[in-house]
Image (tube, rainbow, N blue to C red):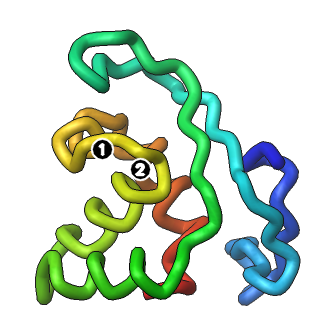
Amino acid sequence: MKFKDLPRHAADSDKKEIDPAGLEFPVQFELRRPVAANGGADVKTVTLREPTVADVERADAAGTGGHGKMIRLLADLAELAPDDIRKLSAADYRDMSDTVSCFL
């Protein structure tokens, strides 16, 4: 499923949030700007698999504040290194975070 096709519900009148009840994995993201990842290869698309309890546990152990938990979770789900996630544009990171934030 592509990010743009994810089910959404109106949480308030100004913002449409992703409806976690309708999520179908894997979710594919077309990056706004490719990043060098996995040893230098240009990555233009990132696919997130469905999180497991073990993924959530690892994310919880990764930090107590800031973005550490989310970076760890996204790295695990995308099979990328945390430093590769840090190279994403802020907009791509926001889209991916919005998709899986209900699991943290």
- Label 1 amino acid? Ile
Which label sits on residue 85? 1
- Please name whichever residue, 18 or 13, is drawn nearer the observer in this view of the structure: 18
Earlier sequence position, callout 2 versus callout 1: 1
- Label 2 amino acid? Tyr
**Position of residue 47 in the picture relative to residue 74 (left or right):** right
Image location of residue 14, percent across then percent down:
70, 75
Which label sits on residue 15? none
Image location of residue 20, percent across then percent down:
74, 81
- Secondary structure at numbered mark 2: helix
Count all numbered tags in the image, as a single digit: 2
**Position of residue 12 in the picture relative to residue 92 (left or right):** right
Tell me the residue at 47%/43% (across/down).
Answer: 92
Q: CA distance from mark 2 to mark 1?
A: 8 Å
- Secondary structure at numbered mark 1: helix
Contact, mark 2 vs mark 1 (Cβ under 8 Å): yes
Tell me the residue at 33%/69% (across/down).
Answer: 70
Which residue is under mark 2? 93
Tell me the residue at 34%/41% (across/down).
Answer: 80
**Position of residue 71 in the picture relative to residue 48 (left or right):** left
Image location of residue 101, percent across then percent down:
50, 77
- Please name whichever residue, 66 or 69, is drawn nearer the observer in this view of the structure: 69
Image location of residue 26, percent across then percent down:
72, 53
| Residue 77 sits above or below residue 18 on the image | above
Q: Residue furthest front?
A: 54
Q: Residue furthest top?
A: 41
What is the quadrant of residue 42 in the picture?
Answer: top left
What is the quadrant of residue 69 in the picture?
Answer: bottom left
